[in-house]
Image (tube, grey):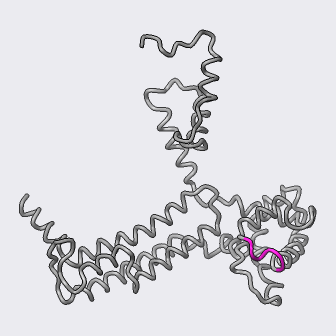
Amino acid sequence: MKARARAIHRSLTQYKMVMFIHLVLDILQELKQLSLLFQRDGLTLQMVSDGLQTTTLSLVAMQTDPGPRLQKVLDEVGPGNTWQNVQLNRRETDNSTFNSLKLRLINDLCRFLSARFGNLETGILKATSTLFDMSNWPEDTAQLATFGNAELIEFMEYFQSILAECGDFTSGEAAKREWLDLKVLVQRHYRHIEPQVLWQRLLTGAIGREDQFKQMKVIVEITQVLPMSSSCCERGFSSMKRIKSDWRTCLSNEMLSFLLYISVHGPPAQQFNAEKAVTKWWSSGCRTRRPQFQD
């Protein structure tokens, strides 16, 4: 046991090990932000694409600019061998070895993210992102005239069965005409608005005339409900396991549904005003309530 403890101590006091641990902490912080983004309600394709791009750029930047935790260690150690009053075992080749390891690790992570989410850059997801992410829209009027036409056709072909059953969608030719009108309107008056807010305004009729974009409203509505994450379902399952435990197996489906709704959509316990609930409980019983019974 003592020999194992000495080996662990020897490993943890290596200069390269200390640097590597803090590099991993910086990387995990970026991945944590991406994970929290994926767990948000109302997640859209554009938010996923932007989050992945931001995380990739942050990781690439760490290849040349150390993250905050690694930078703090570098500033404290400096050219010496002491960190937090601990003597580190440092060799002359440690910096070059660590930099090589850092480049390899970050490149592997970026390749993994690209492979894991590569389908965002192909097929229907790429077409959707091209159409409704206004950062992709060209500034030049001549380029804007034909921009997105091929992606719009691909989108309508992919969701042909859904569009055929929708009474508000009449024809693809009408959608192409509306797409051109929508591009002109957005380019001239609404380019400064965030895309998600813009498309929500379009669906509520706040942009254009009431009957101006009937076809495009159907298409935009489909893009806004594309499921990007199953985190809300996972939270529901976790809440159900927490509420309907082995001690509460007699809960009815109706009461379980009520409790689940409160758990998932209700306010935190610290912000809940229980006065109305207590008043209803006090006054709705068949018999007089006895809260101080056997006190």
Q: Position of residue 250 (x, y in %)?
A: 52, 23
Is 191 within the magenta?
Answer: yes
Which residue occupies the extreme left position in the image?
2
Q: Count numbered badges in the picture.
A: 0
Quarter occupied by residue 190: bottom right
Q: Is residue 276 above or below residue 73?
A: above
Q: Which residue is rendered at x = 53% and y = 75% of the image? A: 54
Is 131 within the magenta?
Answer: no
Q: Which residue is rendered at x = 60% and y = 41% of the image? A: 266
Q: Which residue is rendered at x = 64% and y = 67% of the image? A: 45
Quarter occupied by residue 67: bottom left
| Left or right placement of residue 184 versus residue 154 in this view | right
Quarter occupied by residue 295: top left
Q: Position of residue 263 (x, y in %)?
A: 56, 40
Nearest to the observer: residue 129 or residue 73: 73
Start and end of the magenta stretch?
Answer: 188-193
Nearest to the observer: residue 220 or residue 141: 141
| Left or right placement of residue 117 versus residue 246 in this view | right
Q: Position of residue 188 (x, y in %)?
A: 84, 80
- Quick one: quadrant of the N terminus? bottom left
Q: Which residue is rendered at x = 74% and y = 85% of the image? A: 138
